[in-house]
Image: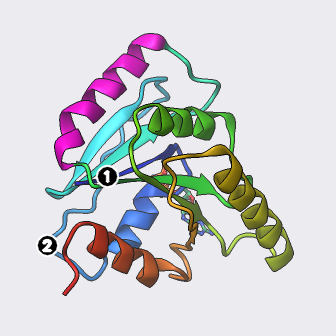
Amino acid sequence: IVCFIGRSNVGKSSLIKALFSLAPEVEVRVSKKPGHTKKMNFFKVGKHFTVVDMPGYGYRAPEDFVDMVETYLKERRNLKRTFLLVDSVVGIQKTDNIAIEMCEEFALPYVIVLTKIDKSSKGHLLKQVLQIQKFVNTKTQGCFPQLFPVSAVTFSGIHLLRCFIASVTGNLD
Ligand code: GDP
């Protein structure tokens, strides 16, 4: 199992569609509950993927946090890697930090994926990448040292990320 976690709208469903567009056996429809709840939502995608949607807006309800941690720990046995999606246009936000702190606290191996890289200019993207890379190098323990910048629109970076996932899940041909 791998897990994709990120704020609402960061591009999780789009990324999963892009990653598995060549695998029609994987059910990629991520059902979304209408309306804005402050709760974290978990979705199963196929057998091997879990998507965690974290609504933004300064979320910090302790009971939801407990829910989330429990679900994590339940799946932990099979949880190979957590992919934390960060919008490359705006960089690391408060909600992203909560997810990072959680991964660090529970010593989960995680990887930061930068989404929507087609949206900003090369200069802006480079600035964000360098800033986030510096953050990863100096402020994290469990984060994979390499960032994965991707676009679900141009498919840039998708192949490499797909190979990486195949490699960590032991599905590399
Ligand atoms: P989720 O809420 O995290 O599942 O996010 P979605 O996958 O639904 O994407 C949120 C919005 O961002 C949608 O309007 C997508 O079309 C857009 N989006 C997602 N990925 C990309 C991308 O790589 N490039 C661009 N330009 N837009 C994207």
Query: Label 1: how many residues lie within 10 Å, few (<14), some (14-19) or many (20+)?
Result: some
Q: Is residue 105 magenta?
A: no
Query: Label 2: how many residues lie within 10 Å, few (<14), some (14-19) or many (20+)?
Result: few
Q: Is residue 65 magenta?
A: yes
Instruction: Choose between 125 and 72: the one closer to the eye.
Output: 72
Q: Position of residue 150 (x, y in %)?
A: 55, 72
Question: What type of secondary structure mainly makes up the magenta span?
Answer: helix
Judged from the image, the quadrant occupied by ligand 1 is bottom right
Q: Position of residue 26 (x, y in %)?
A: 18, 67
- Does residue 93 lie above or below 58 as drawn? below
Magenta stretch: give its range. 62-78
Q: Can you name the residue that lies furthest to the bottom here?
A: 173
Q: Position of residue 111 (x, y in %)?
A: 48, 57
Judge: label 1 CB < 8 Å from ligand 1. Answer: yes
The residue sitting at 62% across, 67% down in the picture is 116
| Amino acid identity at mark 1 | Val
The image's mark for residue 30 is 1
The residue sitting at 33% across, 70% down in the picture is 165
* Colour style of the rendered protein structure: rainbow
The residue sitting at 43% across, 74% down in the picture is 161
